Amino acid sequence: MMLNVKQLYNTLDARLRPEDVAEMIVELMKNHLAVHQLTTLNKAASRSLKNSVHGYTSMLQTFSTAIGAEKQIKKAIEIFKVNEKENSGYNTTDKIETFLNEASPLIHKIVGQNDFKSDRLNKDLRKLAGLDISKRNYNKKWRLLKRIEIRLHKFIHESKKIELQKIAKHGLSHTISFEDFSSDLNAACFIAYFNARSNLRNVFTNHSQDRPFDEICEMLFNRCKIYSEETNWLAISYIYSDKEVLLHLTDEQKGKLLGKWTVILEDISTFLEELWNENDINRKTMAVKKGNDSTTWNNTVGAWNKARDNWMNLIYALGMDSILDDICFGKVMRLMAADVIAWHLSTGGKIDPNTEVWNIVPLPWEVFQERIFCNKEMIVNACKEAGIDPENSGWIAPRLQEVSQFKPTPELVHGVMVTNPFLSKILRQNKYFSGKL
């Protein structure tokens, strides 16, 4: 059983289809589920890849991974003639930094000083430092260490982008420890399935996306409520911070979670500001323009809104919502493709009224950094001006949870549904729907 629990746990940092996670839950819990619960779960499990005619999906089942400095450091080890540490695996920030701090002094290079004209040692300084090597050899080593530093900065940047994409999709579920996950099977099954539902890719549509909390989530969550005394509610709160979950946490647990989400918001706000300054974004329409990095922006926006939702849930759960009278930062809008906006307008729709609120209230990172004042009253007035309910729209209060019906996971090519995973693979290889034909 523990092996099955470990396999289920590994899905938290992956992008498996909900059907395949449901099938794993059936194998793990079939002797513990009532007939009606098993029937509900089989709505998804019966469509797993194991039970499918095709038996495979063309969509990646993992998140992207940042590329470390393994290649560059292997070369440096060869050139510097230093002993390689066993199982080094230079794919973490700490290990790359450790190598730089150990290798740079060998040629008297200071980490962070990479100007080729001013930061290298000349012949006299090399001799004074006891470096009995040629200028060519010295420059070769110096340039290599500089490239490793550049790779480190890229690795940190890409790692941050991937981390924000995960937060945007499923909150902090990928940070739950195996010990906490395996301590309660009911919570583990709910977390794993809701995680898979949350990780679904967006469908190209002029309607709203399906809510991740479906009828199977509801059934698994109800099991957690039935066995409430044994349920690991803290672990659940990492992915699902609904009022009903937070009621089971102590004030200390809620306070620590609030602190965690506040730190995350601060980090995201800084990154959002960088992206805002780097991209010429049309704030009025939020339509993508040439040169906009819409993928990074939208992933970061998703992380901000997810973190903000959790922060808001905890503020209310702790009875601290009066703080919103002093400071309240708003949601951030995603960039939309111009053809999607045109499609929406052609079918009788109009620009999302949330975009109107976004245009009225101050930019949230400016508010978070206390450069501009904004509070609950200002956001309420902006919502009224745009004709939307400030509470039910999630601008000043926790979102209301809705239960959706289970729908089979579609095969997608750049968000467009296709009928067959093999067809999906061919279309993707030939760049259909990618705008590159």
Image (cartoon, helix red, strand yellow):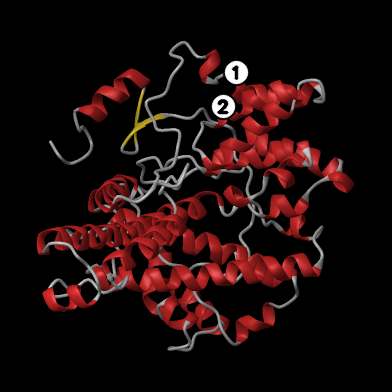
x 23%, y 28%: residue: 429
Q: Amino acid type of disc 1?
A: Ser
Mark 2, other Cα within 10 Å: few <14 / some 14–19 / many ≥20: many
x 67%, y 65%: residue: 257
Q: How many marks?
A: 2
Question: Which mark, residue 46?
Answer: 1
Task: Decide if residue 47 is in sight here.
Answer: yes
For the residue pair 51 and 107, the one nearer the viewer reads as 107
Ranked by sequence position, the earlier of labels 1 and 2 is 2
Which image quarter holds the C terminus?
A: top left
Marks 1 and 2, how far apart at CA: 7 Å
- Kindly indicate whether the residue at mark 2 contacts the one at mark 1 (C-beta within 8 angstroms): yes
Residue 411: percent from left, percent from top: 39, 28
In this image, 211 relative to 5: left or right? Answer: left
Residue 139: percent from left, percent from top: 15, 62
Up/down of 286 relative to 202, above or below: below
Q: Amino acid type of disc 2?
A: Glu
Up/down of 107 relative to 196, above or below: below
Residue 85: percent from left, percent from top: 45, 47
Residue ID for mark 2: 19
Residue 65: percent from left, percent from top: 40, 45
